[in-house]
Amino acid sequence: MMAVFSSTQSHQLFLNFRGEELRYSFVSHLIDAFERNGINIFVDRYELRGKDLKNLFVRLQESKIALAIFSTRYAESPWCMDELVTMKKLADQGKLLVIPIFYNVEPEDIRKQTGEFGEKFWTLAKRSTGDEIKKWKEALECISDKMGLSLGDKRSEADFIKEIVKEVQRVIAAIGTEDEVNHFGEKNKKNRKCNFPREITVFKRIKTKKIKF
């Protein structure tokens, strides 16, 4: 596993994405933008196979923020799904702030496992255990219900990347400021399916909706 990170720096950013689909396109440009802006990131460059998440869990624990980059082929990968489950666990413990990024997918399709995304998910589910499916569905529904950023039809990827970098910078600046601590991206206290006890309200424009200019 190759990573882009330094253990001496704080506010590490963890990237969760479908490598075969985005590694050499959108994500490569996003990584370059983070590095140019001095944002310390960790990225699993090879999306390793297997069920041992020990090393991954350590890297996630070292991070303060995680981006879950949902795309059409995201649910093809059990590794992506297991990463998401681990991210949800840490977020439930107040140790990680997770921001969903919707790359050419609808948030509702992620939450309900429908559309082309859903087809990929249920194909994976056919060769998975009931416990795995349950955990994956819970993580998808929980993380996708948080406030995030979505690539609109009339928006360039370059502008989208700039917006993501800007919002991550705002989150980093807000971390540790008690006055700004709130339930980040909370939709409904009574009906929440997962717990995010210490989250930071930073996104002001959207809640899992497309931004159009």
Image (cartoon, helix red, strand yellow):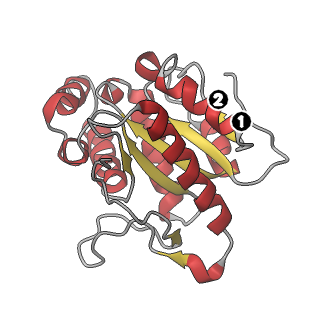
User: Element under label 1?
Assistant: helix
Q: In percent of the image, x 17 and y 46: which residue is there?
A: 112
Q: Mark 1 Cα within 10 Å, few/some/many (few <14, many 20+)?
A: few
Q: Are marks 1 and 2 in contact (CB under 8 Å)?
A: yes
Outermost residue on the left side: it is 115
Residue 23 drawn at (x, y percent): 51, 20
Query: In the image, which disc is placed on residue 36?
Result: 1
**Circle 2 is placed at which residue position?**
32
> In the picture provided, is 84 more to the left or to the right than 57?
left
Q: Would you say 119 lies left or right of 9 here?
A: left
Describe the element under mark 2 as helix, strand or loop: helix
For residue 53, what is the image quadrant?
A: top right
Left or right for 135, reference 91: left
Examine the rendered structure and indicate whether residue 210 appears above or below residue 204.
Answer: above
Q: Is residue 50 left or right of residue 148?
A: right
Q: Residue at coordinates 56% horizontally, 76% vertically from top-left? A: 181
